[in-house]
Image (spheres, grey):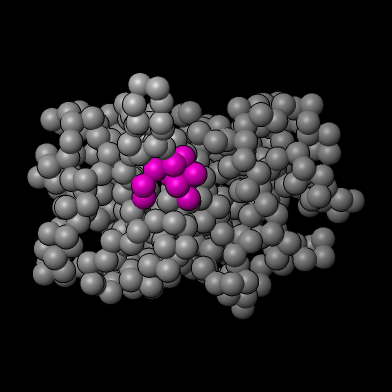
Amino acid sequence: MAIQICVPKEVRKDEQRVALVPDIVKRLAKDDVQINVESGAGELAGFPDSDYESATLVASSGELLGKADICLTVNPATNEQIDQLKDGSILIGYLNPHSDLERFNKLKQKNISAFSMELIPRISRAQAMDALSSQASIAGYKAVLLASNILGKFFPMLTTAAGTIRPSKVLIIGAGVAGLQAIATARRLGAIVEGYDVRAAVKEQVESLGAKFVDIEIKAEGDGGYARELTDEEKQQQQAILAKHVAAADVIVSTAAIPGRPSPRIISTEMVEGMRAGSVIVDLAAEGGGNCELTRIDETVLHKGVKIYGPVNVPSMVGNHASELYAKNLLNFLELLIPEGAINIDLEDEIIRGSIITHGGEILHAGIKEQLEGAS
């Protein structure tokens, strides 16, 4: 009997992505795999129902979820969706493993094997499945375009009959995937760009993109490619050096975020007050509280002439390509999970073991299990 894979329509407000795009559906659909897509699921991403020729379209989300062996989502499944899922099925998507943990008890009770795309190990073998990186790259690109729209200046130098326009100065805080893409995009637009990160090891990457590296002479490499938390003394050193670069910037794009922890506060109110009126901050870390003290989620704050914008779900703003990249991440993960047309949850595999949260009526993720047991 064919494995039933379902793709529900995303229910998060303003979400424009879809878990599988038509091209990936064609590659997955075989005699032993049937793809069922909720009608309208891809519409906001630019994929109408007519494009899903290799899938079966289903009008009712309850019917779709109830017969699925594997359910693919972009955003975490809601409690209602979890209730509709078939007992013993598999759920794969962004599961937001650091909040609303009671959902995992519901998944455990329904014997659902839940895989969180945020927890895919950052190892070379898993690069093609790394949804955090694929979506962060889009966020970094889009953040610079958002800043250019808000800024009342050109990015590039322009020589006109009326005089010469100086190029804008852009400071990118955080040189991870999002930050490096933001640097590359700002450079393409002709700005003078500086990149800052507490991880000294990324200096070469920043400079390879044509930006100047802001060196505060602190080495803060942490686990999993993320930065460790700075000591109080290091934070003071960071603030003192960074303040000069913040004051000189026309645009700041901040990208410093650590999954499961509040975003590090890097830009103080005092720093903002040292910036020129008309300057812009786009804070990609807004959902974690923001890198700037003045950031408000999904709002634009005007403080003494400086605009601070804290957008949320930025990859969704580039819904078409964000969906394509995410669908490829899922395809590569499914090839590991369904190697020969049969589901095989191999807990000895580092990628499977690292990304699974619930399985066999138990919570396998140690951190989430500990938090839930502590709460109860």
Q: Quadrant of residue 301?
A: top left
Q: Nearer the viewer, residue 188 or 322?
A: 188
Residue at 79% x, 50% y is: 28
Q: Nearer the viewer, residue 189 or 97?
A: 189
Taking the magenta stretch, the answer to whether it contains residue 224 is: no
Q: Nearer the viewer, residue 318 or 35?
A: 318
User: Which quarter of the rendering shows the C terminus?
Assistant: bottom left
Taking the magenta stretch, the answer to whether it contains residue 186 is: yes
Is 59 drawn above or below residue 256 in the view shown? above
Residue at 63% x, 48% y is: 325
Is 104 drawn above or below residue 270 in the view shown? below
Can you give x and y, in whole percent of width and height, for residue 319 in the image?
57, 35
Tell me the magenta residue range.
184-193
Can you give x and y, in whole percent of width and height, for residue 148 in the image?
39, 33
Q: Residue furthest bottom?
A: 348
Residue 174 visible: no
Can you give x and y, in whole percent of width and height, for residue 27 in the image?
81, 50
Can you give x and y, in whole percent of width and height, for residue 74 in the image?
56, 43
Q: Residue furthest right?
A: 31
Left or right relative to 35: residue 138: left
Left or right relative to 330: residue 143: left
Q: Quadrant of residue 313?
A: top left
Q: Nearer the viewer, residue 266 or 316?
A: 266
Residue at 31% x, 43% y is: 169
Residue at 16% x, 69% y is: 234
Tag count: 0
Left or right relative to 160: residue 133: right
Residue 11 visible: yes
Q: Residue furthest top?
A: 162
Left or right relative to 194: residue 113: right
